[in-house]
Amino acid sequence: MTHNPPFSFFTLTLFIPVSPLHNSLPQFRIVHIISVPSVPDNNVTFPLVTLATRPEGGATPEEAGSLAGNGSACKRGEVRQSEVRMEKVVNCFCKQPDAVARLVCFPWAGGGSIHYARWGKIFNSSIEVYSVKLPGREARAKEPYAVEIHEIVNEVTHALLPQLKEKPFAFFGHSFGALTSFATAEYLKRVYGLEPAHLFVSGCSAPHSIARTSSQKTSELPDKEFLEWMTTVGGTPPEILGNPEVVNLFLPVLKADLRVVENYSYLKPPSSVLSCAITAFDGTEDVPHDVDAWKELTSGEFTKQMLPGSHFYLKDPQNEAHLVKYITKCLETTEIDYI
């Protein structure tokens, strides 16, 4: 921002007292507020205000004793901030502190966190289930939708990174969730050297598959045509399509998630980007998906399973029971491998 009137230099030191409501947080002092003039002749513009929360050498002598005494309080504050971030992004119905592994589940397009959070009551105590909550729905309904997949990846990673470092974990994602779970897994491996013990994907072609390419952007269709298309591909739970009021609430969320899918482009990598096992599930009556292409993304074991049903085959109680049993066996075996 350019300011035409000249400003004189001044330095102001402010001490900001810590509120009693935030006494677990570290005490900070704003050391300098500096206002400087712009220099139009040299085409250089300085910011109006510069803030520094610490002298370059660290804490001042008078602060050192206070900070030393507040070390444990600072730590508690950091832990609480981490918990708040996780609670915003993750739904966990059943805490299992002694679980051997965690299963992080990513919702399908337009979906919430409740379906998978309920899995926490179905799995035994060896598996703790985290269900991802995306912006624009449930308690986060007032937040803007994600536009690009990296927004989801960054948020989930930032919220869960401490927990993912604690013990083995796996990802499960159906349809849209298969893509977001893979993108998160790939990012974790590339940036942090972490990867799931197992990646379970469902009802979706691999991200680099030519089967994903389409000249039509379905998210831009008028609502009536969009619903007809969704009915054709079986991509919407029937209980939603049968209720006009629910449809009106559901469509904006669904279209927003499909827009993320349409914006997501992933080229076939020259070599495997993961080393974990991948299991790809699909419904026998669903529209064809290129699930075999998932094996090209890992140097680990690849398994394909076809279960009876259409796109939402996983809602069938027998299929759900099969998924829970299979995932539990994989993760309990993985724990033995880790030991």
Image (tube, rainbow, N blue to C red):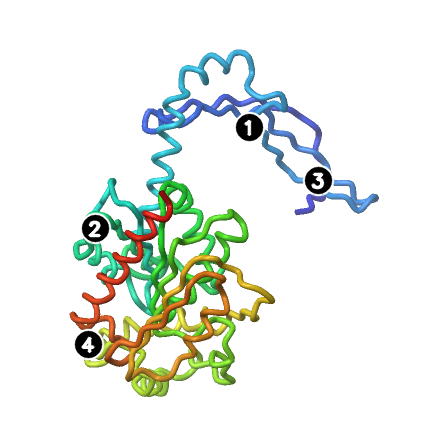
10 Å crowding of disc 2: few (<14), some (14-19), many (20+): some
Left or right: 181, with 239 as reference point: right
Mark 3 to mark 4: distance in Å? 58 Å
Residue under pointer 1? 53
Mark 1 to mark 2: distance in Å? 40 Å
The residue depicted at 41 percent of the width and 54 percent of the height is: 196
> Where does residue 169 sit, x and y in percent of width and height?
36, 50
The residue depicted at 23 percent of the width and 44 percent of the height is: 96
Q: Give SS at disc 2.
A: loop
- Which badge, 3 or 2, is on the more N-terminal residue? 3
Left or right: 39, with 287 as reference point: right
The residue depicted at 32 percent of the width and 59 percent of the height is: 105
Task: State yes or no: discs 3 and 4 in contact (Cβ < 8 Å).
Answer: no
- Which badge, 4 or 1, is on the more N-terminal residue? 1
10 Å crowding of disc 4: few (<14), some (14-19), many (20+): few
> Where does residue 50 sit, x and y in percent of width and height?
62, 34
- Between circles 1 and 3, the one closer to the viewer is 1
Residue under pointer 2? 93
Q: Quadrant of residue 236?
A: bottom left
> Where does residue 64 sit, x and y in percent of width and height?
50, 14
- Between circles 3 and 4, the one closer to the viewer is 4
- Which badge, 1 or 2, is on the more N-terminal residue? 1
Residue under pointer 3? 46
Foreground residue, 131 or 254?
131
> What type is the residue that disc 1 sits on?
Thr
Q: Give SS at disc 1.
A: loop
- Between circles 1 and 2, the one closer to the viewer is 2
- Which badge, 1 or 3, is on the more N-terminal residue? 3
Number of on-image labels: 4
- Which badge, 4 or 2, is on the more N-terminal residue? 2
The circle drawn on residue 239 is 4
Q: Quadrant of residue 182?
A: bottom left
